[in-house]
Amino acid sequence: MATVIQISEQALRECCERAHDLFKLNRLRGHEEAAASFDRVYRALGIDPQMREMLQGALLELVPVNGIPLIEATSAQSMLAGVMVGLLIADSALPAEELDLPVTSKL
């Protein structure tokens, strides 16, 4: 049987606070600085640029609207943000010593 991550209320609360702080801070930054911040977070969570490109491609295939580039891009970016929050939840739910991710990386 596969191991399932157990997410406590505290871990979920911490994740939501981390995500809130990250997204709020990035709203206050310029576009390039915010994008670089998200890049650093993905790398810290173990998602390298090649993996992120694959993820973005997979998300584009899931977008239910085709032929309207603005809606496609907005939907894919929203889903990518959701993936980041999911990774932050997983990161908050697991003890740091059990992770094989660079969770102590400076953001």
Image (cartoon, rainbow, N blue to C red):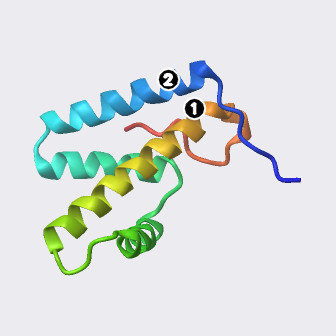
Q: Nearer the viewer, residue 90 or 75?
A: 75
Q: Secondary structure at mark 1?
A: helix
Residue 31 point in image, percent of width and height: 13, 50
Residue 36 in percent (x, y) is at: 26, 51
Is there CB contact under 8 Å for labels 1 and 2?
A: yes
Q: Tell me the amino acid under the disc marked 1.
A: Ser
From the viewer's perspective, is 64 left or right of 30?
right
Q: Residues within 10 Å of mark 1 (few under 14, many from 20)?
A: many
What is the residue that sits farthest to the bottom in this orientation?
67
Q: Which mark is residue 14?
A: 2
Vertical position of residue 79 compared to residue 5: above or below: below
- Lateral position of residue 47 relative to residue 98, left or right: left
- Residues at marks 1 and 2, CA–CA distance in whole angstroms: 7 Å
Q: Is residue 40 above or below residue 105?
A: below
Q: Earlier in the sequence, mark 1 or mark 2?
A: 2
Q: Which residue is rendered at x = 18% and y = 46% of the image? A: 33
Quadrant of residue 66 within the rendered picture: bottom left
Question: Which quarter of the picture shows residue 52?
Answer: bottom left
Instruction: Specify whether 102 is left or right of 5.
Output: left
At a point 83% along the width and 53% down the height, the residue shown is 2
Q: Is residue 96 left or right of residue 102?
A: right
Q: Quadrant of the C terminus?
A: top left
**Position of residue 23 measured from the top left corner of the image (x, y, whole percent):** 28, 36
Give the quarter of the image for residue 5.
top right
Residue type, label 2: Glu
Residue 33 bears which disc, if any?
none
Residue extending farthest to the top is 10
Total numbered badges shown on the rendered structure: 2
The residue nearer to you, when weighing 93 against 32, is: 93
Q: Which residue position is annotated with label 1?
A: 92
Identify the secondary structure beneath mark 2. Answer: helix
